[in-house]
Image (cartoon, helix red, strand yellow):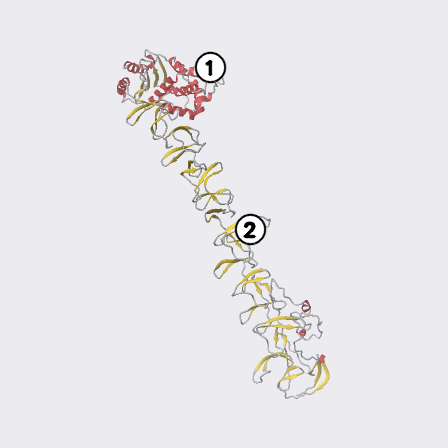
Amino acid sequence: MKRHYKLYKSGKQWCCMALTTLAVMTAGMAAHQTVQAATNNTTMPTEQISTLNRTQDDESEASEKQTPSVDQVLDVSQASDVVKTPTESTVNAVETTVPATKNGWYDENGQKVYYQNGQTKSGQDYAYLESMTNPQEKNWYMVKDGVALSGLQKWFGTYYYFDPVTYLKVTDTEVPVKWANGAVTPYRFDQTGALVQGLYTDSAGHQYYSDPNTYLVVKNQRVDLPDGSSMIFGQDGQALKGLQHFNGALYYLDPATGRMVKHDYRTFNNDIHGYLFGENGQAQTGLQEWFGTYYYFDQETYQLVTNQYLPVHWANGDVTWYRFGKTGAIYTGLYRDGQAVYYFDPSTYVTVKNDFRIAEDGQGYMFGSDGKAISGLQKWFGTYYYFDPATYQMVKNNYIPIKWPNGETTWYMFGPTGSIVTGLYQWYGTYYYFSPNTYEKVTNEYIPVTWPNGETTWYMFGPTGSIVTGLKEWCGSLYYFDPYTYEKVTSKVIYANGKNYWANSTGSLSPYVVTGFASRVQNFLNGYSNNSNIAMTFIDLSTGVPSFASINGDSYMYAASVGKLPIVAYVQELINSGKLSLDTAFQYTSAADYTADHMIKGGTGSLQYQNPEGKWYTVRELLTKDLIESDNAASNQLLYHIANANSKDFDGFLGRIAGISSYSKYMTSNQVAKVMMYIHNQGGIANDLLSRTNWKNNKIGALPVRVDHKIGINGSINNDAAYVYASSPFVLVVMSNGYSDSAISNIAWNIYNLK
């Protein structure tokens, strides 16, 4: 076929073009993929962006000062290494005739032109043609109107690059594209030759990233990917792997994926001094919280610090020191550094100073001003503790010698809490007493011990300091201390070491011998052994040491008005000790008729008929009415204002003189007899009043000598307690149920005649 051609000038070269109108094949353009990158510092020049979407047949030319952007597109018309195909507008009016027999590649005007049967194929195509270098082989070329294209070319919605020398498509490499204005920008093409957008792994396994908007290969830059992961690309565009310093920070990029490690701790080469990477992937420094505790990372090496005591500087300028252990975790609890022991608070992590702590081993430690555990005797919160010099642990339940600077040694007891012991303390099966003033163990002393309830009990401590039981000689007298209660025994016959003793009201012992008088009385009383309605106690006082005889003497009976005697004895005791006076006055109150263990309201006595409420009565007046008239109202006032007002002291007093644990109107004849004997020995007003009772000659009072006695009657209950001033004085108590006055008188006469 014969064709006409026109010559045209392209740059400095002449080219030819067929006059026949050629249909330019254009491929459908696929929409550009969009890959978002959180960080992209490599962008196309703005001059490139301004020419975006220019078509290949656009006749206008961009300013030589502009650098085209991607998809103007990467306006290939501006790429200086692109072979341009002729167009009608550039053809000169010169015609020539080309032989129609051309086949294959021809160099024409600096271009490679492919002919087939003397013709060039119109339009653009990517064709499988004979090789330019070896006609026996074939290669793929991008041709337009028969002219081989090179450089950056758009094809089916993306871009490819064809080597300007071989015209072959470039694959799996990076190409610097030079623009008409002299700018050079790198682009990477994948294994198919397509221009890369986003993350790409080449055939060698190297990773690269091309900006989804500009197609530029990202270099020396961090990229945050849409999936939330991040990568760093080096100066050659390759993704960095492993530990990498970048922009003044340290990062770790997974060797397999290149992804940045975030919020994780990693170690390398079996070195425990690892790195902690934060939310932004940067290696952390300073104090860091991790899995519920704290670690410290070196400011220069970024590595975990172990086995060090370090200062942490806070934003406000404060500095706090912390210790980090062998695993790097912040230390809490006890820490031993050679011979020194420290403690780090589990809440604040700081070194405890000038404080006491119970450590994780359950032991107590005291720490000084430098944080070191201290030993020896230490004062803390008003008391003393002792810390073992070897272990620094607080000593508990132990008796410890303390050596003073002057060479003296003092022993102290430290209790279950570790504090120094004062007062009564049980240790090794017995009791000791430690002075509240000196803290030392008390020896050879009789000490009052006050209990939490306010009661006071006296105890004797021997030469070793242990509490005394049994016989004990002290201050020239012999005493007996009960093996069960440890208290001094008073007003009682005791048997110890094969002998009988009488313990008087002070506890002083005298040899106890049953007198002939008491023996005869006992034989008489035995005649009532099968009668539970009567209880009697006799005390022979002729020798100065009481000698007892009794029948049912420990059986409790209702005392009726005989129960007033313990109150009288306590009142007289307070008078004798100066704590009370016979002239002390109390205001009458009917509340006394309802106080604990009161006498029944009414009965004998004149006070109830004197409209007494609110009136004042002296102790003398109340005792007189109580003992002469057996006035229940008067007795209740004494019980209310004096005895029950000091109930603990009252009960303690009764325990000492008669073995009565607490006051009650139910008493034994032995108890009443001891109270009666004690009242006589007190030598107070009561003895005279008891001798002048309105029942002076009744019951035991019928004897022909002076009798100080107190009767008690309530229904069938008929009682009498008396001190008889016979030639051999004695105490006699009869407590009965159903016995008449004359029957009691007969008993008294029989005993009186046995003297």
Q: Is residue 90 above or below residue 348?
A: below
Q: Quadrant of residue 58?
A: bottom right
Dot 1: element: loop
Name the outermost residue toward the front: 406
Residue at 53 percent of width and 49 percent of height = 321
Q: Nearer the viewer, residue 283 or 708?
A: 283
Q: Identify the residue under disc 2.
A: 312
**Nearest-to-viewer mark from 1 and 2:** 2
Q: Count neighbours of disc 2 (C-alpha within 10 A) and say few if under 14, some if 14 to 19, many if 20 or more.
A: some
624 sits left or right of 323 in the view: left
Where is residue 736 drawn, in percent x and y? 32, 19
Tell me which amino acid carries mark 2.
Answer: Val
Q: Nearer the viewer, residue 325 or 100?
A: 325
Q: Count neighbours of disc 1 (C-alpha within 10 A) and say few if under 14, some if 14 to 19, many if 20 or more.
A: few
Q: In this view of the protein, can residue 724 be seen by the observer?
A: yes
Q: In this view of the protein, can residue 604 be seen by the observer?
A: no
Sequence order check, earlier mark of 1 and 2: 2
Dot 2: element: strand
Where is residue 54 drawn, in percent x and y? 68, 72
Q: Identify the residue under disc 1.
A: 610
Where is residue 708 drawn, in percent x and y? 36, 14
Marks 1 and 2: CB-CB under 8 Å? no
Q: Quadrant of the C terminus?
A: top left
148 sits left or right of 531 in the view: right
Alpha carbon distance from label 1 to label 2: 88 Å
Tell me which amino acid carries mark 1.
Answer: Gln
Q: Quadrant of residue 702?
A: top left
- Badge count: 2
Where is residue 706 drawn, in percent x and y? 35, 12
Q: Is residue 274 above or below residue 511?
A: below
